[in-house]
Amino acid sequence: MYEKLPYYMAYPMPFSYDDDRTERLDAEYLKSLYPDMPRRILPYVEEECDRMEYENSMIYDRYPDKLQIRLMCRRACENAAAHEKDLDEERLMELTGVMLCEELYRRRCGQRRRSRRFW
């Protein structure tokens, strides 16, 4: 009448690895939809975030320092302006600031997710 299922089939483990992969692919796809100027600036923003991503970095502080965020933004802008042509300086600074904050938010969420304890 009722067949018994093995324990591993009755109570499967959650597939959190697949969720992370799905989120990463979704983020990459949405980044590919960026307009031309943000798409050209994005590698410089990611490079600056990579440079500041280390254990106990200020980007993982509860309230990151506003001055340090602006310095990161300025370094990314200078790097982008040196390598890219036809960039409006005022728009570049504002756009880079927004993109930097968004990238920091994404990395902080990922770091919180990785450091979660399950006991």
Image: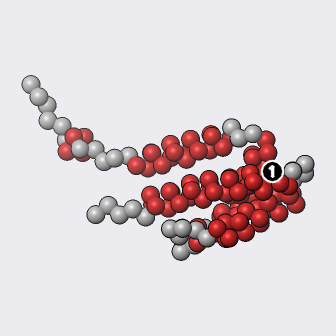
Task: Please state if 44 lies on the left or on the right of 3 as rendered.
Answer: right
Quarter occupied by the N terminus: top left
Which residue shows up at 81% across the image and 51% down it?
91
Query: Where is residue 112 shown, x and y percent of the image?
Result: 46, 61
Which residue shows up at 32% across the image and 61% down it?
118
Quarter occupied by the C terminus: bottom left
Query: Where is residue 15 shown, x and y percent of the image?
Result: 38, 46
Place residue 94 in its image quadrant.
Answer: bottom right
Place residue 18 in its image quadrant.
Answer: top left
* Residue matched to label 1: 91
| Above or below, comparing residue 79 to residue 18 in the picture | below
Query: Where is residue 44 shown, x and y percent of the image?
Result: 75, 58
Return the residue nearer the eye: 91 or 37: 91
Which residue shows up at 74% across the image and 51% down it?
95
Return the residue nearer the eye: 57 or 71: 71
Disc 1 packing (10 Å; few <14; some 14–19; many ≥20): few
Amino acid type at image mark 1: Arg
